[in-house]
Amino acid sequence: MLTSLSIENVALIERLRIDFGGGLTVMTGETGAGKSIVIDALGLVLGERADSAMVRDGAAKAVVEAEIDADSVERLRARVEDLGADWQAMLILRREVTTKGVSRCFVNDTPVSVAILKGIGDAIVDIHGQHEHQSLLRAETHLGILDAFASLDGERDACRASYLLLQDAAARLDAAERARDAQEERRAVIDHQLREMQSVNPAPDEDAEIERELRVAEHAEKIATLTHELLALLYDGDSNAVDALGKSQRIVTELSGIDETLAPLRGELEAAMADVEDVVRTLRSYAERVEYNPDRIEKLRHRLMDLAALKRKFRMSLSEILERRAVLEDERAGLENIDGTIAALERDVAVLRAEASLRARQLSASRAAGGAKLATAVKAQLKDLGIASARFETRLGRKPAAPGALWLEDGDARVAATEEGIDVAEFFLSTNVGEEVKPLVKVVSGGEVSRVMLALKSLFAGKASIPVMVFDEIDVGVSGTIAQKVGAAMRRLSRGHQVIAITHLPQIAACGDGHLLVEKRVAGRRTVTGVRALDADERVREIARLMSGEQISGAALASARELMAIHS
C-alpha cells in the first residue's frame, strides 16, 4: 500500500509529507485549498505527464517521493531487479521536474525512464479522476472495460496476433499488386538502362587495362629504341655484358687455380650470366610483341571514350556499373515472376484471413457471454448505490468494411477489423422503471455516471491486483442518502484495497477510517498548502463544516457524530 507521499515545491506546496493508513482515507478541504495539487503530485510520481508549470514559483525544481509497502506488490520484484535496483521492503519512487521541464525518475534511487516509472505506478495505484467520468461516456472505451471484466486478455492477444499476421501478409500482397501495376513502366526503365550498359558491355577493370595497353601502343617506337639499346648493352653490342661476364669467368677460374678461396666466385658469375640471359630473352620477346599500329591505337581510344561516357551517364565507377547491372537483371527477373508471387500471397492472405476471422468470432462470443455477466453484476452494484430499478446492457455490433480497408469474414459479410477483433461495444442504461435502455451518454446525470463508474471500479477491484485506488471527487452529482450509499460502497471496497477519496460530502467523509484535511495558510507573505491528519474531535468538526458551512451549529455537530457512528 501507499504509506507516505512527500511533496516539495509543487504549486502551493512548499514541503509536505503525508502518511497514509490502510482502509478508506478521506481527504477534505475548502475549494481551492489544494486537494487537486496532492492528486496531481501523486500522478506525477506515478509517471503521468510532467509540466514545468507545476514547479513552485522561486524554486529550481519540484520533487515528489512515494513510499510503497512492497509486500503488496511482490509481483513487481522481477521488474525492479531487472532495472538493477535492489528489492527492498519499502519501494521508493521519486520524480523530479525542473523549471526547464527536465524530468528525472528513480526507483529505489536507480534512474529509470518515465515509461518504466509509469509501468510500475500503473501496477500499484489506480487514480480515478473527473476525466474518467468523461471517458466512460465515450463508447470507444467500453470494449476495453468489457474485456477487462471478462478476463479476455488471452483471447485478445491471440486475436491480435492473428490480425497482425494478416495485416503483414495483406500489406505484402498490396505492395506486390502495386508493383505489378507499375511493372510495365519499371520494366521499360530497367530495359533502357540494361541496353545502355549492354551496348558498351564493359568487363571488370577494362578501363584500367585499356589505359595501360594504350600507353604502350602510343609509345611503341620509343619502346623499340630503348629495348634495342638495352639488348646491345647486354648481348648484341661489340662490348656487352654477356661477353664481359664470360671473360670474368675465365679470369676467376685462373685465379682460383692459384687461390682456391676464390673458387665460389665462379658460381656467382655463372648465376649472373644466367640472369642476364633471362633478361635478354624476355626483352626479345617483349620487343617482338610491341608494334606501332595506328588502327589499334584508334580503336583503344574509342573504347576508352565509350567507357568514360558510360561512367558519366550513370555517375558510377566501372565496378559499380557492373554491380548495378546485376541488380537490374535480378529485378527484371523478379518482375517476370510477379504474377506467381501475387498468387502465392493471395493464398497466404486467404488462409490468414480465415484464421483471424475465426479467432475474432470466438472472441466476440466470449464478449457476448461476458457482457451478460457484466450487466447482471452492474445492476446489482447500482441497486446497492441507490438505483434499484437500473437496467444495464452491453451491446455488440459490427461495421461493414470500408473500401480498401482490411476486413474479416462474418458469415458472408465483410466486416471492419482491428487488432481488437470485429466488435464495437457500447453500454446502455435505464435508471427508471418503464424506460427503455439508451446509450449511456444519453441517459446519465453526473450523479448516475459517478455511480456507474464506482460500480465498475468495485467489480474490477475483485479482478485487478492493483492495491491502491484513488477517487478524486467521484461523488459529483450525488447527495443525501445516495451519498451514504456511495460512501458505504467505498468502505466495502477498502476492505480489500487501500482507498483514498477526495470528497466534499459529509456522508462520504464519515465513512473514512482516516481523515486528512487540506488547508491553505499564509507564511512569510506566501500562500502554502498543508495537509494534516484529524483526530476524532477534529473529524467531527470538519464533517459538521461540510454539512453547515463555516458557522458550525450544535445540531451540525450532533449530526456529524451520528453519521460517524453509523459507519464506526
Image: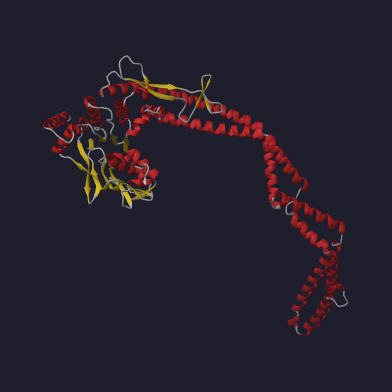
Q: Is residue 75 visible?
A: yes
Q: How is the image coloured?
A: secondary structure
**Location of residue 390 with respect to 508 vertically, above or below:** above
Left or right: 555 as drawn, with respect to 200: left
Of all residues, the one furthest to the left in this rendering is 554
Left or right: 378 as drawn, with respect to 182: left
Count of number-bearing discs:
0
Left or right: 399 as drawn, with respect to 105: right
**Location of residue 282 with respect to 84 vertically, above or below:** below
- Quarter of the image containing the N terminus? top left
Residue 257 image point, x, y percent = 79, 83
- Quarter of the image containing the C terminus? top left
Give 403 or 463, whichever is nearer the viewer.
Answer: 403
Q: Quadrant of residue 191?
A: top right
Q: Is residue 568 visible?
A: no
Of all residues, the one furthest to the top in this rendering is 434
Residue 84 image point, x, y percent = 37, 49
**Location of residue 73 with respect to 362 vertically, above or below:** below
Residue 204 image point, x, y percent = 73, 52
Left or right: 485 as drawn, with respect to 235: left
